[in-house]
Image: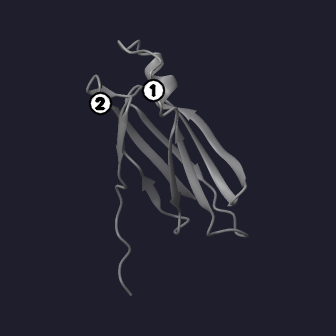
């Protein structure tokens, strides 16, 4: 099984985004998605979930949905409620069903930065 993990960092307070809600969906078609997991980050702002890649659709795309608005509303920042980004959606593929896919994120109410922290496949 593949593993999807993330470490979400709160760029406002300079610490972990403990408790942020993260969902993962498998995009079976452009109009159909299936929930794979729905979790909250631990005290270190981390999630790690195994994902079974269906044999009938190994090329499906996946979406990670980070609920940034809800997270920052609970932080009671000075301009509470003024966020135009309610969620951050990262679309990715999982080409190797045995690989670990780590997607770290730095998050603020009005911006984010995300990257993939993994090994490049060897050239054949």
Q: Residue furthest bottom?
A: 124
Q: Tell me if mark 1 has few (under 14), some (14-19) or many (20+) residues whose alpha carbon lies within 10 angstroms of its own.
A: some
Q: Is residue 90 left or right of residue 45?
A: right
Q: Is residue 40 left or right of residue 117?
A: right
For marks 1 and 2, give the CA distance: 15 Å
Toward the viewer: 97 or 71? 71
Residue beneath the point at 49% across and 27% down: 69
Q: List x then y, in percent, for residue 53.
A: 63, 61
**Which mark sits nearer the N-terminus, 1 or 2?**
2
Residue beneath the point at 56% across and 51% down: 63
Can you say which quadrant of the picture contains the C terminus?
bottom left
Q: Tell me if mark 2 has few (under 14), some (14-19) or many (20+) residues whose alpha carbon lies within 10 angstroms of its own.
A: some
Vertical order, 107 against 3 (above or below): above
Front disc: 1 or 2: 1
The secondary structure type at the circle numbered 2 is loop
Q: Residue furthest left?
A: 14
Residue beneath the point at 34% across and 55% down: 117
Q: List x then y, in percent, for residue 93.
A: 53, 62
Q: Check whether the beta carbons of the residues at disc 1 and disc 2 lie within 8 A of each other.
A: no
Toward the viewer: 96 or 31? 31
Toward the viewer: 82 or 25? 82
The secondary structure type at the circle numbered 1 is loop
Q: Residue 44's mark?
A: none
Q: List x then y, in percent, for residue 110.
A: 37, 32
Q: Residue 83's mark?
A: 1
Q: List x then y, in percent, for residue 94.
A: 53, 63
Q: What residue sits right under mark 2 in the picture?
A: 11
Vertical order, 110 against 117 (above or below): above
Q: Is residue 79 left or right of residue 66?
A: left
Residue beneath the point at 40% across and 32% down: 45
Quadrant in the picture for residue 122 = bottom left
């Amino acid at each position: 099984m593949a593993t999807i993990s993330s470490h979400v960092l709160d760029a406002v307070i300079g610490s972990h985004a403990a408790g942020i809600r993260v969902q993962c969906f498998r995009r079976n078609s452009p109009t159909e998605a299936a929930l794979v997991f729905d979790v909250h980050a631990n005290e270190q702002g981390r999630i790690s979930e195994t994902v079974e890649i269906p044999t009938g659709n190994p090329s499906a795309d996946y979406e990670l949905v980070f609920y940034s608005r809800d997270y920052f509303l609970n932080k009671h920042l000075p301009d509470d409620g003024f966020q135009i980004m309610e969620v951050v959606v990262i679309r990715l593929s999982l080409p190797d069903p045995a690989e670990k896919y780590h997607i770290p994120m730095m998050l603020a109410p009005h911006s984010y930065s995300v990257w993939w922290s993994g090994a490049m496949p060897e050239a054949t």
